Image (cartoon, rainbow, N blue to C red):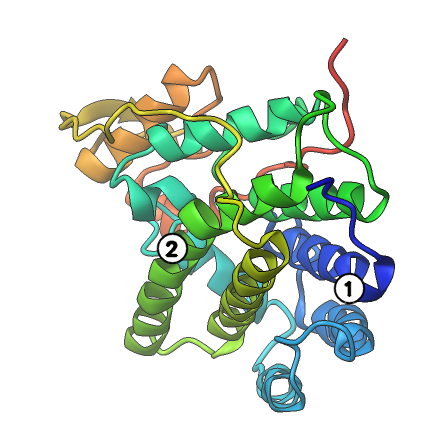
Amino acid sequence: MTGQVPESEGLLPRAEFYLLLSAVLNPGNTNRNGDQLREELLPDLTELSDAVSALTASWLNGFRESLAQLESVDQPLKEYSRLFLIPPAPCPLNLGYHLDGSLMGRTATVLDACYHRYGLERGESFHDLPDHLALNLQWLAWVMALANEGSSGEDADENPLADAAGVIADYTLPAVEQLCRRLDEQARERGLSALWPELLNVVRSQLQEDRNWLATHLGSAKPDPAIAYDTAAETTEFDAIDLCCQSCGVSFVAEEALAMMISRLREAGLSTAHLERCPDCSSSQNAGILAMTPPGAKRFG
């Protein structure tokens, strides 16, 4: 296998699809309002629909209807915060949360190694963990573009499509399937729009398609993740942490879920200030929205 695929097989449209969804799921994207989703994202997805199988006419019509039913222009951002950001977020976008039951476990380690394998590193302004879905989708777009060009990673023996197939099958898709189930449930219970469930479900559908398509393309070769990492998922229990709210200055106690997130981020050398907010401030602000960028083409060496 060389990893080279003719452009007619649709690698570039797939890459563009993952880049679009990576951008809209990036916590640093504070311009994620109803008008922009309607006037920018929807036309871009519609343009890709002939080449990206998950973007069916039925899905596009449903997404268009969900946008039309928004009650305010900032509703998408508010619902994003409630679902994915405000601690304790009911539907974290960290893949390891759904696969390992913890942060900074096996999944984060494997995916971070995948980025490094292709000479990529997280930007300095990125303050989340390497298993964030926005990062993973951009990495998938990166390796699909490499494969389309007939290129490989830093090692000439590497196969971008085999790495993509292994990561999708073993990490991205299983986590997104669990995330979608939880997201559908939480959106119904909280009386939220169908907007975010629809966007995550179309990601799931395309990942399923690409898993099957890559398996067929790769034939008998077994796609493996970019690194073998046999450490079992950690099940450490975390004690409550005494904190001072970064917004109002009041002292409060972070219970186990929030304490786990803060502990893992600190272990990774990342800032936790965006999480150190008391419940009152967390619920009254779009807490947790960071100036973040997915990993770009920043090379080592």
Q: Residue furthest front?
A: 220
Badge 2 marks a residue whose secondary structure is helix
At a point 61% along the width and 29% down the height, the residue shown is 115
| Residues under numbered marks 2 and 1 in contact, where contact means CB atoms less than 8 Å apart | no
Q: Which image quadrant is residue 248 in?
A: top left
Q: Residues within 10 Å of mark 2 (few under 14, many from 20)?
A: some
Residue type pointed to by label 2: Pro
**Residue at numbered disc 1:** 10
Q: Is residue 291 above or below residue 174?
A: above
Q: Residues within 10 Å of mark 1 (few under 14, many from 20)?
A: some
Q: Is residue 232 above or below residue 93?
A: above
At a point 78% along the width and 64% down the height, the residue shown is 9
Disc number lying in front (2 or 1)? 1
Residue type pointed to by label 1: Gly
**Residue at numbered disc 2:** 174
Q: Which image quadrant is residue 16 in?
A: bottom right
Q: Is residue 182 left or right of residue 84?
A: left
At a point 46% along the width and 33% down the height, the residue shown is 274
Q: CA distance from mark 2 to mark 1?
A: 23 Å
